[in-house]
Image (cartoon, rainbow, N blue to C red):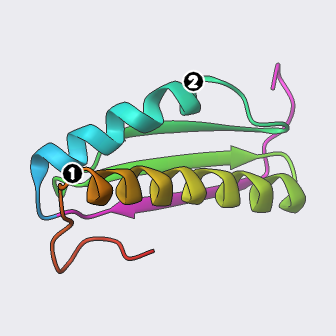
Amino acid sequence: MSGELETWTATVTLQLTDPQLTAWVERALRPEAAREVPRSRAEVRPAASGGLELSISARDSGAMRAALNTYLGWIHLALATARASGREAGPTDAAP
């Protein structure tokens, strides 16, 4: 966002029972987080609890809504892909 004031922030924590699934979702999200969603930016990192943490910064509420919808959609797609490939999410994993 090249120096623009960021006023909206959100953190999404994804807790999965399978560490390999967590790593797989992180690898799926990392390229998306590296590119800029309009008027926002994101960072994906391991959470202290062993899960996955996604931090989003946005210039305004509309950009935050769009970024959250985009990243949550990508998380949903990654988990649906894992399920379709036979890697089932555990009972405490994020539901669609």
What residue is drawn where x is 77% and y is 62%?
65
* Location of residue 32 in the rendering, given as x and y in whole percent from the top left corner: 57, 31
Would you place residue 91 above or below residue 54 in this image? below
Residue 80 is covered by the magenta coloring: no
Would you place residue 53 above or below residue 45 in this image? below
Q: Which element carries disc 2, helix, strand or loop?
A: helix
Q: Which element carries disc 1, helix, strand or loop?
A: loop
Residue that numbered label 2 is attached to: 34
* Front-most of residues 29 and 48: 29
What residue is drawn where x is 67% and y is 52%?
70
Quadrant of the rendered image containing residue 64:
bottom right
What residue is drawn where x is 84% and y is 36%?
38
Q: Quadrant of the C terminus?
A: bottom left
Q: Residues within 10 Å of mark 1 (few under 14, many from 20)?
A: few
Please indicate whether residue 87 sits to the left or right of residue 70 in the image: left
Please indicate whether residue 27 sits to the left or right of residue 61 in the image: left
Q: Which residues are magenta?
A: 1-16
* Location of residue 31 in the rendering, given as x and y in whole percent from the top left corner: 51, 25
Residue that numbered label 1 is attached to: 48
Task: Report the amino acid beneath label 1.
Answer: Ala
Task: Report the amino acid beneath label 2.
Answer: Ala
Q: Residues within 10 Å of mark 2 (few under 14, many from 20)?
A: few
Please indicate whether residue 73 sits to the left or right of residue 88 in the image: right
* Location of residue 92 in the rendering, given as x and y in whole percent from the top left corner: 20, 78
Quadrant of the rendered image containing residue 87:
bottom left
Q: Nearer the viewer, mark 2 or mark 1?
A: 2
* Location of residue 72 in the rendering, given as x and y in whole percent from the top left corner: 56, 59
What residue is drawn where x is 27% and y is 50%?
47
Closer to the chain start, of discs 2 and 1, is: 2
Q: Do tag 2 and tag 1 residues touch (Cβ < 8 Å)?
A: no
* Front-most of residues 18 and 38: 18
